[in-house]
Amino acid sequence: MSVWLVTGASRGLGAEITREALERGPSVIATARDASVVRRAYPQGPDGLSAAVEAGLARFGRIDVVVNNAGYGVIGAIEEISDEAGRALFDVNVFGVLNTLRATVV
């Protein structure tokens, strides 16, 4: 049986991937920016990416599939959004992906 880590699992595509994977049998480590939604849907899991990876490795011994799904968009032309909004978007959509990959390389 494979072990999946799914980011952005609180809603949308990430939630659907998580539900479908759980129905088909793989073990799933689910993470999200809004951890409270994931905790409500999957109350047995830990908080935070590092904690989730560590708990997943402790429980399952490995991670076979990483679905690096977390991210969001900002509506508006790039020159119209604030530096703060642009940096936050970049942090999640670029560095979030990198952090997830780094955390899951064992």
Image (spheres, helix red, strand yellow):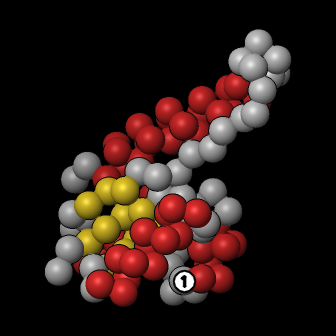
Residue at 51 percent of width and 62 percent of height: 13
Q: Is residue 51 visible?
A: no
Horizontal relation, residue 37 to residue 70: left or right: right
Number of marks in picture = 1
Residue 78 locus on image (x, y percent) = 72, 18
The one of 36 and 55 positioned closer to us in this rendering:
36
Residue at 63 percent of width and 57 percent of height: 33
Q: Which residue is mark 1?
A: 42
Q: In the figure, residue 59 lies in which quadrant?
A: bottom left
Up the image or down, 90 lies above or below 70; here it is above
Q: In the figure, residue 102 lies in which quadrant?
A: top left
Secondary element type, mark 1? loop
Residue 11 locus on image (x, y percent) = 61, 66
The one of 19 and 61 positioned closer to us in this rendering:
19
Label 1 amino acid? Tyr
Horizontal relation, residue 35 to residue 19: left or right: right
Q: Is residue 90 visible?
A: yes
Q: Residue furthest left?
A: 1
Up the image or down, 68 lies above or below 16; here it is above
The one of 79 and 28 positioned closer to us in this rendering:
79
The one of 51 and 3 positioned closer to us in this rendering:
3
Residue at 65 percent of width and 33 percent of height: 89
Residue 38 locus on image (x, y percent) = 60, 74
Residue at 25 percent of width and 49 percent of height: 105
Residue 22 locus on image (x, y percent) = 37, 83
- Count residues near mark 1 (Cα–Cα under 10 Å), then give few for <14, some for 14-19, many for 20+: some
**Quadrant placement of the N terminus:** bottom left
